[in-house]
Amino acid sequence: MKVMKIRKEQVKYLCIIAFGANISSILLGILHYIIGLHIAIGIIFSIIIVLSWFLNNILIILNDFKIVKSSPEGKKLNRLGYGFLGVQIIAIFLLVGGLFLLNANWFSPLLQYTLIVIGFLSFFTYGSAFSYLNIKAIDNREVWKFE
Amino acid sequence: MNKLKIVKGILGILCILVLIWGAFWVYMLFFGGGILRGITIVIEEFVAQSSVLMLGLCIAVTILLMKLLASRRINHPKQYYAIIIIGFTISGLNSMSLLATPYTIINADLEFKDAFGLNWRNTIPSNIKNYFLQSPYFISSHFLSIPEKSIIVEKDILFYEGENISLYFDVYMPAKPAAQLPGNGSIIINLHPGAWMSGGKGTWNMISTSKYLAGQGYVVFDIEYGLIDWFEYGAAAPDTPEHVMGNFTIEDQIRHIGIFTNSCESEFAATYGANLDSVYFMGRSAGAHLAGVAGLGYNYDFHNTTFSPNMVVKGVIPLYPPSAAPELLLKENRSTNPDLYNAYDLAHLSDPLDPPVLIFQGTSDGQVSIERVVALEADIESKGVECCLLKFPFAGHANDFVLSTNIGQVWIYYLERFLYLTRNIS
């Protein structure tokens, strides 16, 4: 089976774009609540959310395939990947809970939005940190297995 | 076996359980709860609304499985890739409701063109459009919800006592003067679901929608009506208050709604700044049937003493509506008293003087089938009533619970436009 070769520069660009997309998602998320719904921001924000979610997951998969897990830094990134998946799963449950509870008249509106905001921000904040740590480790020959 | 292996084993099992859950969600998306019945009838109500998040969950656990099974990638590649392909397939199938959103929008647009003309969008002034959702769907709003506008809510206001029951309503009003908003104080009488025998105002009558509409300048009355205590139904709605239960039939429920219209005319419209010249009946499931009877039967001889004569009904908004009353819930059956049955049959009540109708219906609804609702739309239109049917692929019963999903956003986008367009029809 022919395996596609991935170059260091490609991973570096992916990490940089993922970092930028995660930070943009956080900023646009805050803007969403401050200025309300706006068509241009809504379109850009929707594209960036999908992009950052996609890139974050690609990065976790790339880590799994291309990292030397026996090296101390590689082990750390591998564990952070597990952590990111855990955060992602928890964030989904927080979002589901928050969105469904918006209809509950027995639940505090503050708590409803807190669940949504924590769910949303935790994913993109972790994503920013994860992609940043990957950028930092990209030049470390002990961490990445590039051909 | 060391601790790490045990943890990895437990995580792997949990991941597989989540994928089985995801596969069940896929089944429910395609077939609803109509085949399996039982508890699946209730589960169906949450499936399509959470399928986008289920997509995210299934992808996360599939990647987690990839990491957990990394050693098998070399030793047992077939097993490894088979599990990954299954995981991503289940994830992909959970995106069907999301992927169907463009179809929903195209279909809704065609329905509006049929009802309000090809140029319907341009009939809404741009200063009004500024208050509306700018697009039928934003993924960003799906996760962060639609920001709420400033509104006033008053709860548990008594409007009727008698027959051993007390009936209350909640009212949602704009904080701004209604005249500055698209709704202009139009009244929306919102009737809750629950198979005529359960449920109540509030949580299960989609508070988010009531709040949203209040923010648009509508005065939403979320009202109770007497519930039938001798009828049993497999998927009863929760939170049914004791003070509304009695030995009733559907005739009594319509009478209770009529009592509210009279109280509204004499007292509540003035109290809450509501506009009696622009009234809508909106309801869900059994409440949709009652909304249909009230809205389409307002000018029907059989009901001519039931409702306030001083309200102008501008539209009817039934969501997942049964087309007629079950015979056993009326005082007499169809063969002994066909006139009575007809007075609670939405198609029979329709006539060219009736206001336009906007219907919400999911195609995977196991309680009210899409075929019946399509037939209802055709029957209503054949009687000369403008009717828009918004079909939501893969959505089940009560799938408008979360306002910000791909289903909820599209629904609200067309609902607010329908309200504005019909409010201005004389």
Image: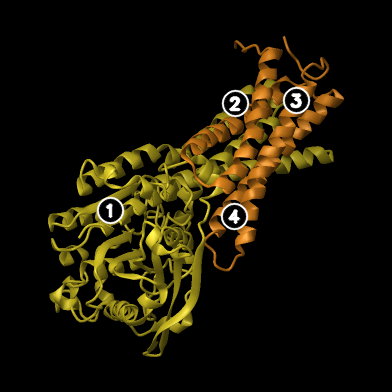
Which of the two labelled residues, at mark 1 and mark 2, occupies the earlier sequence position? Answer: 2
Q: How far apart are the alpha carbons under marks 3 and 1?
A: 54 Å
Q: Nearer the viewer, mark 1 or mark 4?
A: 1
Looking at the picture, does residue A30 appear above or below residue A65? below
SS of the residue under disc 2: helix
Which amino acid, by three-letter code, is at mark 2? Tyr
Mark 4: few/some/many CA within 10 Å (<14, 14-19, 20+):
some
Name the residue rendered at 28%, 62% in the picture: B316
**Tag of residue A28:** none
Left or right? Give the position of B147 relative to A71.
Answer: left
Q: How far apart are the alpha carbons under marks 3 and 4?
A: 31 Å
Which of the two labelled residues, at mark 3 and mark 4, occupies the earlier sequence position? Answer: 4
Residue matched to label 2: B81
Q: Nearer the viewer, mark 3 or mark 1?
A: 1
SS of the residue under disc 4: helix
Q: Which chain carries label 2?
A: B
Residue matched to label 1: B421
Which amino acid, by three-letter code, is at mark 3? Asn
Q: Chain in yellow?
A: B
Q: Which of B221 and B317 is in front in this view?
A: B221
Percent x, y of residue B124: 30, 47
